[in-house]
Amino acid sequence: MKIAVLGTGMVGRTLAGAFTALGHDAAIGTRDPGATSARTGPDMMGAPAFSEWHAANRHIPLMTFAEAAEAAELVVNATNGAGALDALGSAGAARLAGKVLMDVSNPLDFSQGMPPVLNPVNTDSLAERIQRAFPGARVVKTLNTMNAGLMVDPRRLADGDHSVFLSGDDPDAKAVVKGLLEELGHRDVIDLGDITTARGAEMLLPLWLRLYAALGTPNFNIKVVRAVE
Amino acid sequence: MKIAVLGTGMVGRTLAGAFTALGHDAAIGTRDPGATSARTGPDMMGAPAFSEWHAANRHIPLMTFAEAAEAAELVVNATNGAGALDALGSAGAARLAGKVLMDVSNPLDFSQGMPPVLNPVNTDSLAERIQRAFPGARVVKTLNTMNAGLMVDPRRLADGDHSVFLSGDDPDAKAVVKGLLEELGHRDVIDLGDITTARGAEMLLPLWLRLYAALGTPNFNIKVVRAVE
């Protein structure tokens, strides 16, 4: 499948690398490829400069948001939550129309210090904002509840015995995303329901951040334990 | 241990019954025992009238909030979140001072319809509000992330292979609560940190409510899967 991963941070790089390793035709999208490639030093999340990663991953092309989306059958929003609507606007509504738009980002607001706050909450979510802004896209929220390493290699932890969530209004789009998750090794994909259920998945982040601090590692995930049928 | 469980809903009844069964000296507190006993028909959450439950549990005394708190070494806030500060005010700051105050409630606001919204979020929590309002109490947030049946009998699901959280500023109070949780059968008690970490535990509720709808049962819980040390 031709996949555009929008976002050059750790999550975007990790997903693009994993999709490529699975045999998909993945590209990475950014606002300004020249500027992204010219950046030096760690990014705001502490990841090494993109150019360092790209030197070892030359087979994955870096394009503008629009070029990447244009060519893709499936688009992944792996930008940081605060910039997601803007980045998707650069990709262009027409290039997203009809496509599965896998949203893995979290609407974390770092402007008020640490820990970040989540915005929106309760009666809206970033996934819904994206769906409203791009009504032709088939938005599926997923993977936002775990570390990038576990997103693409869930079996590295407890042989994959933990859960991942899906939220979206389009059943076919959710089936496509579920298939991709299973290719990555996810064993327990829970369909929460329509796109409004992304509120719950996004609101897990504050607990995730506290667990990260308490456990001292991001190598953990949530398993929804339920009675065997 | 002498335990006052404030709140006569399903959670309060279930906890008081379980603590009694473990050999603790538990009482239930309510605003007006006469009015609570006189109520007929299901409560706002669909639980049978208190009097029906109490007819089968006469050995657990029903008292005012103040009477129950006065006699107790440990006080449990099992009122509904919206009424918690008011109920604890009725119990009285002097009667809570120095005591462990186990807060199991969630600040759900049903006034805007279903699903309820959570208030406060992000930069505050109900647990912190309680701690600020009653600085002499030693507040520990716990158990708010699961159904009442699992609170008191975690081994009914996957032999207890799932997690429960603690948040609080007083290490000794957390140790007391941890001991009580272990008596109930909890095997994985995760100390998230200080009282501000209750924000994360409370913000799990929207996901919990969506999982309840998606799974069709409240008989599930979250397990934090992490690498074996």
Image (cartoon, coloured by chain):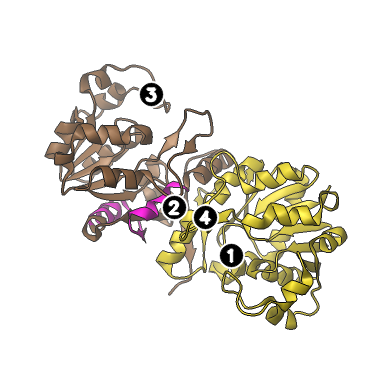
Chain colours: A yellow, B brown
Tag 1 near tag 4, CB within 8 Å: no
Query: Where residue B145 sits in the image (x, y, percent)?
Result: 42, 47
Q: Quickly name the residue at label 1.
A: A160
Q: Residues within 10 Å of mark 4 (few under 14, many from 20)?
A: many
Task: Using a 10 Å C-alpha cutoff, classify the residue at mark 2 as few (fewer than 14 neighbours), some (14 to 19) or many (20 or more).
Answer: many
Q: Position of residue B156 (x, y in %)?
A: 40, 48
Q: CA distance from mark 3 to mark 2?
A: 29 Å
- What type is the residue that disc 1 sits on? Gly
Q: Is residue B189 magenta?
A: yes
User: Where does the magenta region start and end?
Assistant: B176-203
Classify mark 3: helix, strand or loop: loop
Q: Are marks 1 and 4 on the same chain?
A: yes
Identify the residue under disc 3. Answer: B43
User: Which circle, 3 or 2, is nearer the viewer?
Assistant: 2
Q: Which mark is residue B200?
A: 2
Q: CA distance from mark 1 to mark 4?
A: 20 Å
* Both marks 1 and 3 on one chain: no
The answer to whether residue A113 of the structure is visible from this angle is yes
Disc 3 residue type (three-letter):
Asp
- Please report, as a chain letter, where disc 2 is located: B
> For the residues marked 2 and 1, what is the alpha-carbon distance in whole angstroms?
24 Å
**For the residue labelled by badge 2, is the local secondary structure a helix, a strand or a loop?**
helix
Q: To which residue does mark 4 refer? A: A205
